[in-house]
Image: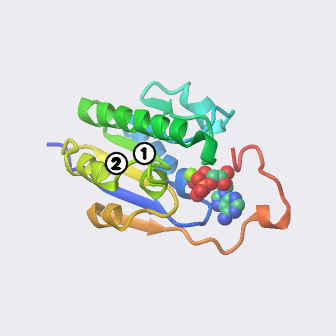
């Protein structure tokens, strides 16, 4: 019988949340498991991980949104994109096709009042048994941390960006 899946939250201001989740994806894929990544509120940039994902048949990658806008003029558009992303997450979680689903940056939905955290909590609580879910993003709501089996906070001690070093191919994207 398959093991029960976990709920994992990776939060905090330091670098390494999305890449830690993708490290877990790599691990699961190595065992022949099926992985789904849903990225909330991200643009269509040429991220190395997305280019790689296109070449991997057991890794299905979905992008919602058009970038971190969070401007007052676009708030309704952002909210709609966030809701569409959440509906996609409901569909993929309910499909029971996957062993691991990564909800990358979903923590911003309740943080920016795009969606009440209870909807995400319910979705996680009712996941298929074998499925593991990783939630990433800053400012994770305490209710998300409470329902999780594993919670890690990545603290920023320093980041190259603060020393004027710009985002680098292969490291930041
Ligand atoms: P990564 O994708 O590298 O694992 P992350 O998921 O922890 O980072 P996010 O909060 O999603 O970080 O930020 C997105 C982008 O900002 C990434 O390119 C990341 O490298 C960069 N970043 C992360 N932390 C910091 C920081 N403390 N200062 C400046 N840039 C950062
Ligand atoms: Mg991230």
Front residue of this view, candidates 35 and 155 = 155
Q: Is residue 72 left or right of residue 137?
A: right
**Could one spot residue 23 in this view of the protein?**
yes
**Could one spot residue 36 in this view of the protein?**
no
Quadrant of picture, ligand 1: bottom right
| Element on which disc 2 rests | strand
Q: In the figure, residue 8 lies in which quadrant?
A: bottom left
Does the numbered disc 2 mark a residue whose Cβ is under 8 Å from ligand 2?
A: no
* Residue 133 locus on image (x, y percent): 34, 48
In which quadrant will I find the N terminus? top left
| Residue at the farthest left position | 1
Give the residue drawn at x 39%, y 63%.
141
Rounded to the nearest angstrom, the CA distance separating label 2 from label 1 is 7 Å
First along the sequence among labels 2 and 1: 1
Q: Is residue 156 above or below residue 70?
A: below
In this figure, which residue is indicated by the disc labeled 2? 133
Give the residue drawn at x 77%, y 50%.
167
In this figure, which residue is indicated by the disc labeled 1? 103
- Label 2 CA crowd tier, 10 Å (few <14, some 14–19, many 20+): many
Give the residue drawn at x 72%, y 66%.
159
Give the residue drawn at x 48%, y 63%.
11
Front residue of this view, candidates 165 and 82 = 82
In which quadrant will I find the C terminus? top right
* Residue 93 locus on image (x, y percent): 29, 37
* Residue 106 locus on image (x, y percent): 45, 49
Q: In this view, does 56 lie above or below 168?
A: above
């Amino acid at each position: 019988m398959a093991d029960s899946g976990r709920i994992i939250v990776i939060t905090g201001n330091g670098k390494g949340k999305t890449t830690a989740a993708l490290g877990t994806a790599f691990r699961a894929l190595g065992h022949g498991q099926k992985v789904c990544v849903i990225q909330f509120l991200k643009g269509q940039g040429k991220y190395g991980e997305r280019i790689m994902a296109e070449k991997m048949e057991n890794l299905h990658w979905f992008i919602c949104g058009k970038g971190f806008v969070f401007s007052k003029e676009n708030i309704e558009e952002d909210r709609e994109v966030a809701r569409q992303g959440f509906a996609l997450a409901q569909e993929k979680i309910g499909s029971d096709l996957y062993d691991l689903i990564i909800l990358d940056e979903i923590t911003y939905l309740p943080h920016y009042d795009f969606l009440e955290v209870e909807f995400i909590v319910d979705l996680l609580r009712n996941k298929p048994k074998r499925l593991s879910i990783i939630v990433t993003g800053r400012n994770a709501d305490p209710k998300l941390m409470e329902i999780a089996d594993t919670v890690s906070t990545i603290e920023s001690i320093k980041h190259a960006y603060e020393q004027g070093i710009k985002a680098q191919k292969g490291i930041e994207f």
